[in-house]
Amino acid sequence: MVAKTMDQLVALCKRRGFIFQNADIYGGLQGVYDYGPLGVELKNNLKNAWWRSMVYERDDIEGLDAAILTNRKVLQYSGHEDTFSDPMTDCKKCKGRFRADHIKDGKCPNCGSTELTEPRPFNLMFKTSIGPVDDGSVFGYLRPETAQAIFTQFRNVVDSTSRKLPFGIAQIGKSFRNEITPRNFIFRVREFEQAELEYFVMPGEDEKWHEYWKEARIKWWEEQGLKRENMNIYTTPKDDLAHYAKACYDIEYQFPHGMEELEGIANRTDYDLGNHTKAQEEMNLTSHCHPNPDSTQKLCIMDDNNKWVVPFVIEPSMGVDRGVLAVMTEAYEEEDLGEGNTRVVLKLKKHLAPIKVAIIPLKKNNEAIMNKCHEIKQNLLKLGIGRVALENTGNIGKAYRRHDEIGTPLCITVDFETIENQPESVTIRDRDTMEQHRVNVADLPAYLREYFL
Ligand code: GAP
């Protein structure tokens, strides 16, 4: 069962420290959120799973970590300055501003007035002054997608790694868009993270690779716990495509507020490399590109016949924050335990769980028990399984409840038997089945290695 409402998820996120409204004490900053102690772990685990599958498990993809501040020329030649905009309508009565495609029946969504202005384009990029003089003459942008630096660094990566087609460049990082109507918690925000792969292929092989990446990405999301029946593949109609795309699939997910885009997989053709290339007339481009007198490079690669070619690009682009929301939505369950008892449990895949193991002393502040807890924790840390948390609340029931809610797969309880009997043993409780059994302390590393790695 997926989460019933967004409110339940938002409440859990705040209560347990996953996600907070940014600048909460000053009334917040709309469309901006902060990840708390558990949220940062969950988000890092999701990003690590992506990086592992893209970069470590493959032999054809390199990584990159480029700057957020972006030279204006990059976004002029990419087409973002001219076209990266949403049509907006103002209400003359309440002065509200809305995306034109969000207006229903010609009425203001705020006050119902029909006195609306004609839609006008509103650029979504954040402009920022660069350098000591703030007179607006020298400015750049906060990047609206991570992709552009992959294109502008294309030759540096090729020259430093001797790559041949097909190959890809992967990057995870922040992007910024001045969304007109941020909404649905972390679904549509103004500062967010993207995990993007630009996969460069021979022109003519692009459609085959587009299909390949669609299937690969669905499979990856299933490995993160999303059920196939909660996903939908939407083929973007031609007249809705982004300015750079020839075709695009969206992987949609059944979020609490509806079936919406989680990841886009676009065929960007040779549009971007072509637009950032000098002397385009020599390059046999298929895209319509604007002449670029500013670029100093041809963004091309040698093919098998020693001819220069501008590759086509297939781009799986995932929103990390939407990914966090999706895996939490899928994992959230309220279970009826009978006799009027219920529990909230986050059945996250174990590689995503913010805390892997909680060590819980049966008795608070009991020195012998606490020493044993510390000793076990130090030994488990050496396994490299992720975060191991030590509780000292003395209330086992509350500790189990908390760890069910935050998705901790295993709780280890240290009790009097542990310190008084030989061989030393602890109980291990499974989050999903709630079953408990005893394991010898000496066997814990092997047990957990087998379970997590
Ligand atoms: N480089 C291609 C690109 O940026 P996009 O469809 O505009 O394509 C890719 O964005 C992904 O980034 C989306 O599928 C979504 O998951 C995420 N994303 C886009 N805008 C977002 C926003 N305002 N808030 C959160 N995530 C967003």
Image: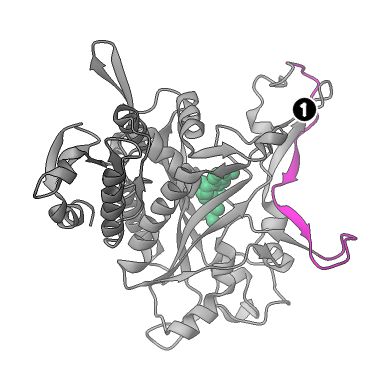
Query: Secondary structure of the magenta portion, mostly?
Result: loop
Is 420 left or right of 253, judged from the image as shown? left
Residue 244 placement (x, y as % from top left): 57, 57
Residue 255 placement (x, y as % from top left): 44, 32
* Tag 1 residue: 96
Q: Quadrant of residue 234?
A: top left
Residue 367 placement (x, y as % from top left): 31, 45
Q: How many marks?
A: 1
Magenta range is 112-138
Is 309 left or right of 207, judged from the image as shown? right
The vertical placement of 114 against 10, above or below, is above
Q: Residue at the far right: name it.
A: 135
The vertical placement of 385 against 262, above or below, is below
Which structural element holds mark 1?
A: loop
Q: Residue at the far top: name it.
A: 339
Q: Residue at x 83, y 66 (%)?
A: 138
Q: Residue at x 12, y 38 (%)?
A: 437
The vertical placement of 217 against 402, above or below, is below
Q: Residue at x 54, y 80 (%)?
A: 155
Q: Quadrant of residue 404?
A: top left
Q: Residue at x 48, y 39 (%)?
A: 18
What's the residue type where badge 1 is placed?
Answer: Gly
Q: Residue at the far left: name it.
A: 422
Q: Is residue 235 visible?
A: no
